Amino acid sequence: MKDLVLNGWKSENGFWSGYLFQLEDALKQQFPKSNIRIRPHIHSKIIAWKKIYSSLRDILQHRGVGFNAYNDYKIECDDDLWYHIVKADTNAQFFRGKSWPYWEHWQVIFGYDRER
């Protein structure tokens, strides 16, 4: 997916039409014996990743929240702040203590330039 972004398949408002077919073709070339399809495999995974990325982005925007110093992408903040974050976003309750190794990839794929 990062290759599609780097090759111009992403616009300011999302991906260009046909990007899922490009993904499916790339996966077929990489894994020719697999039966990976746009629906349900690719599309559902992208929806799940977008949801996680959005919640993580919102969590990390709070002052005092960040990833720990061990480079394993686990969220670190004090308990009081975490209580308020979970109160605002119930999906966040499962995010603390879990590693998010795809974070930097998701920033390239789903992120956007906020300075524009």
Image (cartoon, grey):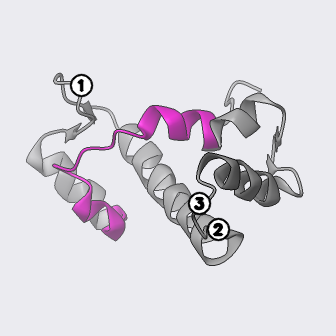
Tell me the quarter of the image containing the C terminus: top right
Give the side of residue 13 with respect to residue 80, left or right. right
- The magenta span reads 88-109
Q: Nearer the viewer, residue 49 or 22?
A: 22
Res. 45 visible in picture = yes
Q: Quadrant of residue 100?
A: top left
- SS at mark 2 in the image: helix
Q: Determine the residue positioned at 61% across, 70% down.
A: 35
Mark on residue 25?
none
> Which residue is the site of mark 3?
46
> Which residue is the site of mark 1?
71
- SS at mark 3 in the image: helix
Percent x, y for residue 101? Answer: 34, 38
Amino acid at pointer 3 = Ile
- Farthest left residue in view: 79
* Alpha carbon separation for disc pair 1 and 3: 24 Å
